[in-house]
């Protein structure tokens, strides 16, 4: 097994090399040459705790990490930073299983991978005898930024620069980032949307003159976005874990298929579920839920990806994305791992904003279902779920839950379903409380957090209390065209 690029099959890297590099020089993403099968039975997995499941899943993808190295990374990641011993608990409501992925330090699912990525990366640097300081360049739609900052803050041999769309994230998301203290961190607002930030960051990764200049000064880029395979692999683990828990609790029988429904933006989380399925996890449908930026919903209808449309700012900002980077990994598989054809499709996307894989679409059509929910649907779902069960979900999870309801209505499918619950409602308290009752619309943000705590009968997470009083330390805002200069200034070249 090795890692190759979706745009150049002559590339062959080890897992640690792929993690360290982040993105291929040709602009492609690293993909495993094969998807390994689960090495343990479902029954055995059902007896495992989170860490053991993570090890079982990850070891076959990260094949050149020793057992000691990988277990050490896992131990350092999934510890008391999480506020629950289960790491990723399953909560049943209205017969659906919500897989709560937001119990980490920054209360979004990004913590599941970004708690471990810094360890995977620094281990990879050691293994590959890299003596350069790693510069993590990250574009965020709101949650990756803080999770990456928390993961890399104070990690020797690394520094991290985060770009976020100014005005395109929630108040809590912004405060979480701009109050980050450690001196190896830099947070910069961009006058543009997430796609602008991500496209520019990818461009900087491929800027060979810049890379040479950096190398001469002792620096090397890597990525904390889900374009890094080191982000994707840890995410596969929680789907396998969820299946194990359902089996252990007798909610499903051994081998019974489940649906997995994921609120989707950059297509990283649901791609991890797809990898889990292809490792042998019994999965019926992967339900890809979008908000108003429903480019993926349209794609799954007939295999045409068309980003030429208005970018809509929604109440689920972490899904406000029109260029879903990780879809490239799926497209590459669909078209028979044809690197040249994939490269040409991605060039079309860049120049015309559109591509079609109509002819090869059959391969994924049966595995995925696209759905979407606008604010009317998802806010109604937050309200009705709360009123019926007392359970409060965040706005992103609500997009998935409302999309799932639409799917069931359309198909009558009774397969047991896991919904990825991707953020704590406290991160989006304003929108969540507005959904429950418009009377709260005028309240101040931290007041709403107190009200939410009483409404949901859930303690306010530490991540929120942290930002109530922390001073703002990052206030730089730049034009998209000045992002490169901001990076060069930060590293002093
Ligand atoms: C990032 C994020 C998503 C989208 O996940 P992708 O892997 O980008 O598809 C959904 N919900 C929340 C809360 C997020 O932070």
Image (spheres, rainbow, N blue to C red):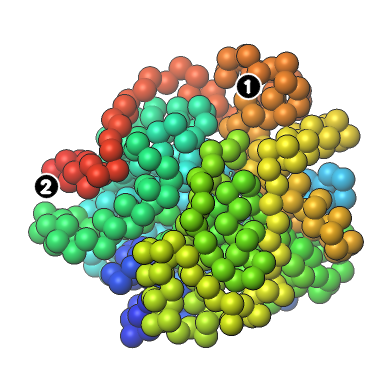
Q: Position of residue 92 (x, y in %)?
A: 82, 47
Q: Earlier in the sequence, mark 1 or mark 2?
A: 1
Residue 256, placed above or below residue 142 = below
Q: Which residue is mark 2?
A: 493
Q: Residue at x 22, y 53 (%)?
A: 133
Q: Position of residue 460 (x, y in %)?
A: 64, 25
Q: Which mark is residue 449?
A: 1
Q: CA distance from mark 1 to mark 2?
A: 43 Å
- Is 91 on the left-hand or right-hand side of 17? right
Q: Position of residue 361 (x, y in %)?
A: 61, 77
Residue 152, placed above or below residue 424 = below
- Is 150 on the left-hand or right-hand side of 279? left
Secondary element under disc 2, as helix, strand or loop, is loop
Q: Nearer the viewer, residue 330 or 49?
A: 330
Residue 331, placed above or below residue 70 = below
Q: Residue at x 49, y 77 (%)?
A: 332
Residue 245: image quadrant is bottom right
Q: Residues within 10 Å of mark 2 (few under 14, many from 20)?
A: few
Q: Which mark is residue 357?
A: none
């Amino acid at each position: 097994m090795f890692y190759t690029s979706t745009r150049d099959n002559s590339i062959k890297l080890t897992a640690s090399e792929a993690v360290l590099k982040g993105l291929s020089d040709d602009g492609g993403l690293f993909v495993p040459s094969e998807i390994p099968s689960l090495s343990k039975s479902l029954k055995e997995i059902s007896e495992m705790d989170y860490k053991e499941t993570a090890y079982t899943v990850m070891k076959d993808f990260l094949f050149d990490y020793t057992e000691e190295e990988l277990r050490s990374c896992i131990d350092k990641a999934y510890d008391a930073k999480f506020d629950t011993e289960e790491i990723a608990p399953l909560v049943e409501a209205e017969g659906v299983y919500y897989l709560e992925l937001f119990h980490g330090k920054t209360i979004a699912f990004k913590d599941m991978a970004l708690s471990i990525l810094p360890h995977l990366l620094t281990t990879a640097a050691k293994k590959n005898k890299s003596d350069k300081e790693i510069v993590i360049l990250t574009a965020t739609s709101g949650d990756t930024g803080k999770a990456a900052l928390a993961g890399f803050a104070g990690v020797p041999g690394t520094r991290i620069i985060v770009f976020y769309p100014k005005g395109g994230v929630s108040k809590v998301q912004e405060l979480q980032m701009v109050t980050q203290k450690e001196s190896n961190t830099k947070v910069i607002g961009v006058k543009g949307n997430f796609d602008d930030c991500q496209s520019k960051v990818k461009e900087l990764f491929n800027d060979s003159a810049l890379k040479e200049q950096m190398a001469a000064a002792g620096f090397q880029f890597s990525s904390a976005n889900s374009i890094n395979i080191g982000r994707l692999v840890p995410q596969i683990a929680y789907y396998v874990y969820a299946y194990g828990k359902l089996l252990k609790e007798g909610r499903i029988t051994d081998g019974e298929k489940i649906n997995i429904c994921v609120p989707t933006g950059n297509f990283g989380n649901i791609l991890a579920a797809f990898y889990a399925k292809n490792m042998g996890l019994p999965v019926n449908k992967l339900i890809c839920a979008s908000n108003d930026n429903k480019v993926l919903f349209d794609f799954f209808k007939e295999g045409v990806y068309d980003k030429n449309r208005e970018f809509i700012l929604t109440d689920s900002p972490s899904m406000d994305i029109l260029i879903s980077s990780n879809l490239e990994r799926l497209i590459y598989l669909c078209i028979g791992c044809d690197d040249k054809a994939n490269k040409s499709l991605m060039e079309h996307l860049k120049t015309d904003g559109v591509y079609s894989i109509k002819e090869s679409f059959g391969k994924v059509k049966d595995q995925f279902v696209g759905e979407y929910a606008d604010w009317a649907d998802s806010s109604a779902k937050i309200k009705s779920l709360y009123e019926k069960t007392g359970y409060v979900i965040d706005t992103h999870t609500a997009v998935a839950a409302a999309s799932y309801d639409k799917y069931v209505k359309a198909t009558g499918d009774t397969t047991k379903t896991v919904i990825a619950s991707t953020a704590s409602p406290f991160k989006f308290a304003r929108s969540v409380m507005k959904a429950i009752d418009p009377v709260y619309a005028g309240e101040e943000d931290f007041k709403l957090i107190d009200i939410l705590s009483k409404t949901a009968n859930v303690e306010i997470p530490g991540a929120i209390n942290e930002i109530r009083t922390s001073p703002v330390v990052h206030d730089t805002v730049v034009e998209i065209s000045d992002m490169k200069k901001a990076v060069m200034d930060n590293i002093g070249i």
